[in-house]
Image: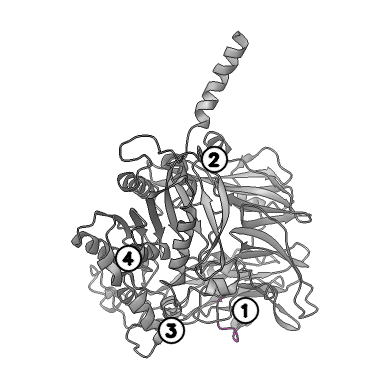
Amino acid sequence: MKKILSTFLFLAPLLVLSQNKMTPELLWKLGRVNGLGISKDGKYVVYSVSTTDIETNKSKTKSYIIPVTGGTAIEISNADSLLNNKKLSPDSSYFLSNKEVKEKKISGSDYYPDLTKSNAYIYDNLDQRHWDTWEDGKFDHVFVTPVGKPEEEKDIMAGEPYDCPQKPFGGDEDYVWNPDGKHVVYVTKKKFGKDYALSTNTDLYEYDISTGTSKDLTEERKGYDINPSFSKDGTLAWLGMEREGYEADKQDIVASTGLGVVNLTKQRDDIHVEGFKWSDDGRNIFFWAPVNGTLQLFEVDYTGATQKLPDIRQITNGNFDITGIVGQTGNVLIVSRTDMNHATELYAVDIGNGNMKKLTYVNDSVYNSIGKCKTERRWVMTTDNKKMLVWVIYPPDFDSTKKYPTLLYCQGGPQGALTQFYSFRWNFQLMASEGYIVVAPNRRGMPGHGTKWNEQISKDWGGQAMKDYLSAIDAVSKEKFVDKDRLGCVGASYGGYSVYMLAGIHHNRFKTFIAHDGVFDLKSWYGTTEELWFANWDIGGPYWDKNNAAAQKSYSQFSPSNFVDKWNTPIMIIQGGKDYRVPIEQGLQAFQAAQLKGIKSKLLYLPDENHWVSSAQNALIWQHEFFKWLDETLPAKDKKGEDDKKAF
């Protein structure tokens, strides 16, 4: 009896821990793993782990190594010295870097040097602001510097008002050495002002160190050309799109050979490549891409001797996302991986059979102490008789004999894949752990289900995609464990637009809405957003073009502001003050409309946040206000405070 009792006492803390759930504070205590590469000797995986200090509102990063075969991680202080320096030329003669260079007069003091306290900006062209930053006349340029001779550094883009790396998200992957050590290939869009705002035509340029000149390698290609990478024998491959102005065009791996430019992934209509890496021997390319609601690892053969389309082989398969390739060691790839219950960890993948071995366990102590959320694939028939994948995420203590409040999650993009991602804001595990079932449809406009499925959303924002959302929530609501009197709808960006749109056409399905940085009024949005190529392609063009039928349909039928007269449901609106993609007037108009109509509503304004929420403390407020609103308008308990109602 004593042995049994002592065993119970030993297990009791574990039983208590197993009943714990994910919380906003716990989510922000997780380590964020980033694979840096394989060590020069091929023996170790080098990676970093960032953790957030809520009190200081800053993150701290430590670096580690772990054997490529697995084992004990060791903290290190010299990560860079263990890795090959891709900024150093192959012959170690030159070093690549980038920094800002002033190329245009913009500020008041540029024109009036004596007025030093002025903070005026003066523009005579578009692209006056981008993402979260006003144009100040400075542009990122690439510099080539002889090793040991910093005074001889040379700006390879001198005099040009163009950026490399590309803003706002480009990094040092935008410029690379040719293995010959004599040339640099870099990405830029040589357009300025209005032309920049209307075009997606980035090109790859090759800079010759000996002559100091650049030539356009992709002049005939009119869409995005990015992420240049050389094989060990000097073959150039990159990610490319065909059509100018279409930022969500099918993205393929393109290679330049002696026979011309070859699209290596053209033959797979369902593949939109997210990223790639050459094999060590230069005979193959590994890449990851969305497919059927996940991100998987693939391999495409490459010989360079023919323009015949090569074979593509899917290496991994399962309910998880491969989010990056760290490096290769023999027949093993080191990759980063997530799923809806786990933040990024590193895995070793057997290239031959796809078997995976976990290498890092940074967050296991947290995940082992909380309940996991079951994720389920469902296939729902749409109104136009198509099969649509819908992810359903259940609370960790799900009981099918109870009724649960349920959230329809609307994905952003609009052409954004809805896969087994792990977000530190829109976190399905956290939502489900608060007692909500989450319904996440792969509606029209998502890659991984074929090009036609992805493209159908363009110029039809408020059409079939809205029907897809309602088909998903209606199908899942047929289950007895779904409380149809407690349905909510949440989303950000295009997902926020979707919330605003559904608020006017949902026919009383939902009891609450939450919209973050969503487009509310298409006309005012077109007049203030910065990347006009996106609005032109997806909406159809400017509102004043009365002869443009597609645009006029968008503004008349697909602008949520046109349906405010039908709003009758509580709504929470979140808006970033430095969001220039979906500027501040969108959230303010929506909040003002709801208030004037007498609808229960709340505005969470984040003055220093852009289209995202980057600050840890702001993110915690975001989480707490999110669930506080749901608790007020869609409680996980019934209004009498009793346990969830029985389904039978």
**Residue 223 colored in magenta in the image:** yes
* Amino acid on which the number 1 mark rests in the picture: Glu
Sequence-wise, the earlier of marks 1 and 4 is 1
* Amino acid on which the number 4 mark rests in the picture: Gly
Disc 2 from disc 3: Cα separation: 49 Å
Give the residue number, with chain letter if any, for mark 2. 372
Sequence-wise, the earlier of marks 3 and 1 is 3
* Amino acid on which the number 2 mark rests in the picture: Lys
Instruction: Please state the horizontal and vertical placement of residue 613, each as a whole percent of the image.
Output: 39, 55
Residue depicted at 42% across the width and 40% down the height: 25
Q: Which mark is residue 477?
A: none
Disc 2 from disc 1: Cα separation: 50 Å
Disc 3 from disc 4: Cα separation: 36 Å
The residues colored magenta run 219-225
Q: Nearer the viewer, residue 78 or 424?
A: 424
Disc 1 from disc 4: Cα separation: 52 Å
Give the residue number, with chain letter if any, for mark 1. 206
Determine the secondary structure under disc 3. helix
Q: Which picture quadrant has residue 273? A: bottom right
Sequence-wise, the earlier of marks 2 and 4 is 2
